[in-house]
Amino acid sequence: MKYRQTYESIEDKARERQFAAVLSRVWGRKLRPLPKNYVLDYGISRAGRLTAFLEIKVRTFQSTKYASTIVNLDKWIAAREIAQTTGMSCILAVRFTDADFYYTELGTGDGVSFAFGGRHDRGDWQDMGVAVYIPMKFFKRL
């Protein structure tokens, strides 16, 4: 089986870890990295008890640039399965260049739309796929 190239750099992962540390402190919860096969980035716990799951995105533009934030459909489906199986929330936290936001209904929320989307700048046809567009009005500012 041939695996798809990963574009996430060491710096990208460091920015995600920094954001995770901020979320952990602000929310008063422990964030534990999940293995890749879970699709989402972290499990969230309090007093040793798992309470939710988390996907982190660090964007390189301001929060007002687009009306919606997008995630790949595979993340949405994984979050839906995790939420249905565990009864726990899946959260999407997004760090923009001007502010941090979070959305507590990843995989289960209404008011989203589905369309082809993704990146065009790398010349990788697999960067385009079905994306879930989550309107920014559904996000809460951290």
Image: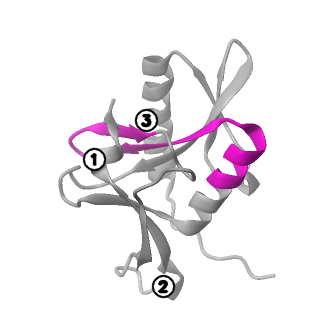
* Residue appearing at x 44%, y 50% in the figure: 57
- N-terminal-most mark, 3 or 2: 3
Residue 23 higher or lower than 100, as above or below: above
Measuring from the top left, give residue 137's x and y in whole percent.
28, 47
The colouring scheme, among rainbow, by chain, secondary structure or one colour, is: one colour
Measuring from the top left, give residue 80's x and y in whole percent.
64, 53
SS label for mark 2? loop
Taking the image as shown, residue 22 lies to the left or right of residue 85, namely: left
Residue 95 higher or lower than 29, as above or below: below
- Mark 2 neighbour class, 10 Å CA radius: few under 14, some 14 to 19, many 20 or more: few
Asked if residue 87 is among those painted magenta in the image, a careful observer would answer: yes
* Residue appearing at x 40%, y 80% in the figure: 122
Q: Amino acid at mark 1?
A: Lys
Residue 66 higher or lower than 106, as above or below: below
Mark 1 or 2: in front is 1
* Residue beneath disc 2: 124
Label 1 – label 3 distance at C-alpha: 21 Å
Measuring from the top left, give residue 142's x and y in whole percent.
33, 29
Asked if residue 3 is among those painted magenta in the image, a careful observer would answer: no
Q: Amino acid at mark 2?
A: Asp
* Residue beneath disc 1: 137
Q: Which span is picked out in magenta?
A: 79-103
Camera-nearest residue between 4 and 89: 89
* Residue beneath disc 3: 19
Mark 1 or 3: in front is 1
